[in-house]
Structure formats: C-alpha cells, structure tokens
Amino acid sequence: MSNIAEGFERQHVPEKLQFYNVAHASTAEVRSLTYVIEDNYPQLKAAAIDLRQQAMTTGQLVGGLIRSTESRKTKLASLLSPLFTLLSALFSF
C-alpha cells in the first residue's frame, strides 16, 4: 500500500511504474509466504489459502494499475510526438 501511495505522488511516469512494480512484486512475496504458513502450520491452512487468494486479487489490481499507467505514458508520447516534430522543424535552420 505504501509503495502504491508513494508512486501515485510521483510526477514522472517511470518513477510511478517503479513503485507500482515493487508493490506488485510484494504481492508475490505474500503469496509465497502463505505456502510457508500452510506447510508449517496446518491449523492455519484455511487462513493461508484465503490470504493467498487476497494477495492474488491485489496483484491483479496492481497489474491493472501498471498497465493503465503504461497506456497513459504511450498515449502521451504519441500526442507529444507531432509537437516535438513541429518544434524541431521550426527551430532547425
């Protein structure tokens, strides 16, 4: 949650994506730890399975945030490209 919040406040898209990717990787860490819990604490198996499912859902949501942010980055670049071409033509003598 903290990585997503910090990434959200970043102004540059590559920085945002870096924090979102760390958050996404953290969901994988949580999922792997649920297997450790399940293997070592049989009485917590149901809770581990539930937590793993929540981590998977969260990972999917963060993945969607990453894809959305990348999409906006691509759209912005395609919108700015003609402007940069025009400016280059105007200022090249």
Image: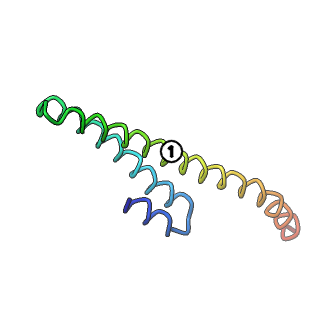
Q: Is residue 71 left or right of residue 51?
A: right
Residue appearing at x 39%, y 51% in the figure: 22
Q: Residues within 10 Å of mark 1 (few under 14, many from 20)?
A: some
Q: Is residue 73 above or below residue 48?
A: below
Frontmost residue, 65 versus 57: 57
| Amino acid beneath label 1 | Gly
Specify whether 34 is left or right of 76. Answer: left
Q: Position of residue 85 (x, y in %)?
A: 83, 60
Q: Residue 31, image x and y in percent?
A: 30, 38
> Going by the image, does 10 lie left or right of 77?
left
Residue 37, quarter of picture: top left
Residue 24 x %, y % = 41, 47
Please tell me which residue lies in front, 92 or 69: 69
User: Which residue is drawn at the image coordinates 31% and 38% (left, top)?
Assistant: 50
Q: Quadrant of the C terminus?
A: bottom right
Q: Residue at x 71, y 56 (%)?
A: 77
Q: In this rendering, is residue 84 above or below 56?
A: below
Residue at which label 1 appears: 63
Name the spot of residue 78 as percent of width and height, x first: 76, 53
Dot 1: element: helix
